[in-house]
Image (cartoon, helix red, strand yellow):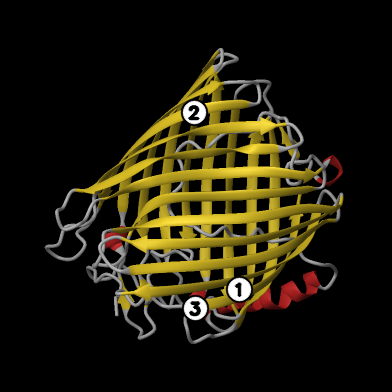
Amino acid sequence: MALPLASPPARGATREPRLALRLALARALPVVLAVALPTAAHAQNVGDNFVTPNLPLEYDRGQNVGVLDRPRPEYEAAGIRVGAFILHPRLELATGFTSNVYETTARTADEYASIAPSLQATSNWSRDMLAVDGGASLMRYFAQARRDQDDWHIGASGRYDISGDTAIAISAKTERATEPATSAAYPTAAAQASQYQVTTAQFSPSTTLGRVKLQGAYNFTTYSFDPYATFAGAVVDQSNRDSTSHSGTARAEYAITPDTSVFLQGNFDRLTYAYPLLPGVANRSSDSTSFLGGLNFDIATKLRGSIGLGYMARRYDSALYQSISGLTAELRVDYFLDSLTTVTLTGRRILEDSPYVNTSGFVNNSVALRVDHELLRNLLLDAQAAYEHDSFSGVSQTVDILRFSAGARYLMSRALGLGLSVSHDSRAASGALALPTYAETRVVVSVVVQK
């Protein structure tokens, strides 16, 4: 059976459960939720992982308005005006049930509660833009306290408008986050949640010259993983997953018509790991390149989206690891069935590094279909089905993930939203690494209070 990578001595120990906070949440949430239905939780997409595009595909030309895009002034938070800024405080309280808290073959059910405060400040200038936001998400399980999660983030973004057609965007963010257990890179021996710190910064200029739009981006990203406790009580350090990357992206887009354009983009990424994989064993530092070409479109009352196909390659510094190359793809298409229903198809094919000593990385293939429906102006329904297939390089190993979810969001007023979500995940694995297979069902109810 494949085990997570051995590592240097642990940098820290497991955290003690904060019983007072957990018990306070357990007592408070049922009282809050007794007055109303909960807010809809956002369903995760299959493929939640560490790879995000430097330049997301752009396609919205204002020709269509989806269910989630439609303005609802009577239900939108007004905010608090402070000088040239508008503050948006928000608090989300939730409680839920999971049928498999550890995401293992032997299921352990548990209930949990979470509290997530956040604050965003956005400029109200006639041109240029500055936004600062921060927040936290604290999750406490009622019985399995070692799965508790403490996440938080703080960041800022801005845009300087040089002219009507030229702008420079800058952003920076640092975040403590929890690795999704559905990811093929998740450490299978972890009894605790696998948490990490990620810090990013981006500089992105853009300009439009007639029918041609040019964009560029430079990204800096650094990851630092926390140690975790195993089911046997040992502490495993994950510092051999710590990394820094520098990447650059350039895109050129040409408008064939006001509704449709074609684009071509290239990307280069330099990834450097901070520590050896094992003592005396080189890690997976690498250079990656990709080229993507495709179509953006926004056809009134019909379709909106972007389709891109191309080539990707990752070459490792050490001869220990096999290079990976092949087809890459990005897809998002919104179909407007009518003014009250939006159907969205998303998909992608990308590369990720493996956490196992037997292989260099894996190809992540994912596709998801989501339907959003406005049953009432203040009652929104959603349903999603998603599939992911991960194929590891150099070994006979695959992972298949299925996810189904449904939710409802009830907007009571500008200040209060309620909802419900139900999801079911199943993961099947086969091959030489003997990765675990599991299934999990979650039910979440929540209340959002905002200003």
Element at badge 3? strand
Left or right? Give the position of 312 relative to 440: left
Within 10 Å of disc 1 (Cα), the crowding (few <14, some 14-19, many 20+) is few
Q: Do the residues labelled 1 and 2 touch (CB within 8 Å)?
A: no
Give x and y (percent) for residue 404: 63, 66
**Number of callouts:** 3
Q: Residue 21 carries which label?
A: 1
Distance between the alpha carbons at the discs numbered 1 and 3: 30 Å
Foreground tag (1 vs 3): 3
Judge whether residue 242 can be spotted in this image. Answer: yes
Classify residue 235 by image quadrant: bottom left
Residue most extreme to the left: 280
Indicate the amino acid at tag 3: Tyr
Q: Where is residue 131 in the image (x, y as percent from the top left)?
A: 59, 36
Q: Distance between the residues labelled 1 and 2?
A: 51 Å
Local packing at callout 3 (Cα closer than 10 Å; few below 14, some 14-19, many 20+) is some
The secondary element bearing badge 2 is classed as strand
Q: Is residue 266 left or right of residue 261?
A: left
Mark 1 or mark 2, which is nearer to you? 2
**Residue 451 visible in the current orientation:** no
Q: In this view, does 261 lie above or below 331?
A: above
Circle 2 residue: 263
Q: Looking at the picture, does residue 64 appear above or below residue 116?
A: above
Q: Which of 396 and 188 is in front in this view?
A: 396
